[in-house]
Amino acid sequence: SSLSGDVGGLRLENPLILAAGILGTTGASMRRVALAGAGAVVTKSVGLEPRNGHPGPTVVRLGVGLINAMGLPNPSYRAFQDEIDIAREGGVPVVASIFGSCPEEFAEIASALDVDGFELNLSCPHAGGYGMEIGCDPANVEEITRAVRRAVNVPVWVKLTPNVTDIRVLGIAAQRGGANAVVAINTLKAMAIDVESGYPILGNVIGGLSGPAIKPVALRCVYELSGVLEIPVIGVGGVSCWQDAVEMIMAGAAGVQIGTALMGGLEVIRDITSGIIRFLDRKGWSLEEIRGIARRRG
Ligand code: RRO
């Protein structure tokens, strides 16, 4: 059974993709993930100016996942082309995650980077004017997507927030703007409190929840989006084993991203791809045959 195919305008050897944020800060770490078997890698989000991020603690580990409030730390896009070039030595497509505050800013950053694709981060849950504050408004989503679509000649993916009443409205806006795919979901707004002191644990108080806890939410979002969109949906959120990835594909995902699960080691990438292949062989199914099958079996 073959896992190769087109995912959001990129030809991938397999549909498992490094999610933005985790291991995407340096070219060396992205190259490592590529060599560990990922079909593509997405960078940590970069913006116009360098940022240190939020004060610490920036991460809380929970049994069900992880809450982060990194605060978009990045060296600015101007210092990032070298990392992209090193990541490309891994031999798979490199997608740059970018953030900004307006269409012009997004277009400026995208125009300046030489990369295989872009993922527009319209969904950081605690970015104060950069993330979901702009990405919750469908008109903004459409305008930003269109601005980048006009500025570059590589695939443009749009990463959506789950922190809304109806994510389908955002997906439709991205599609109208000319997106090649939508990516769902970014992290779910969350917090944690230290009961001994009574203090919120994160320096920023509020952060974004990732990991196993959000997988059912991500699955529901992928299912809803793929039910209304013509463009592909890339599923992300709490995928940590091959069954999780198969569920995403059965909900309609053309690609599956993996982030938090990589903290347990990069072997999970090949565990998942080989698990999918064994599953398809056992069932006598192809990847295309199971994509969206959950809808047909509603
Ligand atoms: O840097 C972050 O704090 C961050 C970002 Br940009 C994002 O998109 N999602 C997230 O959970 N954290």
Image (tube, rainbow, N blue to C red):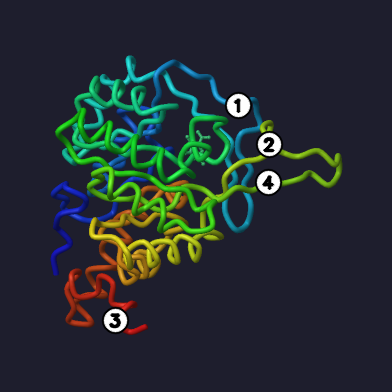
Front of the two marks 3 and 4: 3
Q: Earlier in the sequence, mark 2 or mark 4?
A: 4
Q: Quadrant of residue 27?
A: top left
Residue 251 point in image, percent of width and height = 35, 69
Q: Quadrant of residue 248?
A: bottom left
Return the mark for residue 191.
4
| Marks 3 and 2 in Cβ contact (< 8 Å) | no
Q: Position of residue 112 (x, y in %)?
A: 24, 19
**Mark 4 / mark 1, whichever is N-terminal:** 1
Q: Residues within 10 Å of mark 4 (few under 14, many from 20)?
A: some
Task: Answer with mark 3 or mark 4, whichever residue precedes in sequence.
Answer: 4
Q: Is mark 3 within 8 Å of ligand 1?
A: no
Q: Is residue 238 above or below residue 53?
A: below
Q: Residue at x 33, y 15 (%)?
A: 79
* Label 1 residue near ligand 1, CB within 8 Å: yes
Q: Are marks 2 and 4 in contact (CB under 8 Å)?
A: yes
What residue is shown with label 3? 296
- Kindly state the secondary structure of the residue where label 2 is placed: loop
Q: Quadrant of the C terminus?
A: bottom left
Question: Which badge, 1 or 3, is on the more N-terminal residue?
Answer: 1
Q: Which mark is residue 181?
A: none
Residue 187 as seen in the image, left or right of residue 139: right
Q: Residue at x 65, y 28 (%)?
A: 56
| Alpha carbons under labels 4 and 1: distance apart | 15 Å
In front: label 1 or label 3: 3
Residue at numbered disc 2: 202
* Frontmost residue, 202 versus 121: 121
Mark 3: secondary structure:
helix
> What quarter of the picture does the N terminus occupy?
bottom left
Instruction: Residue type at mark 3: give it.
Output: Arg
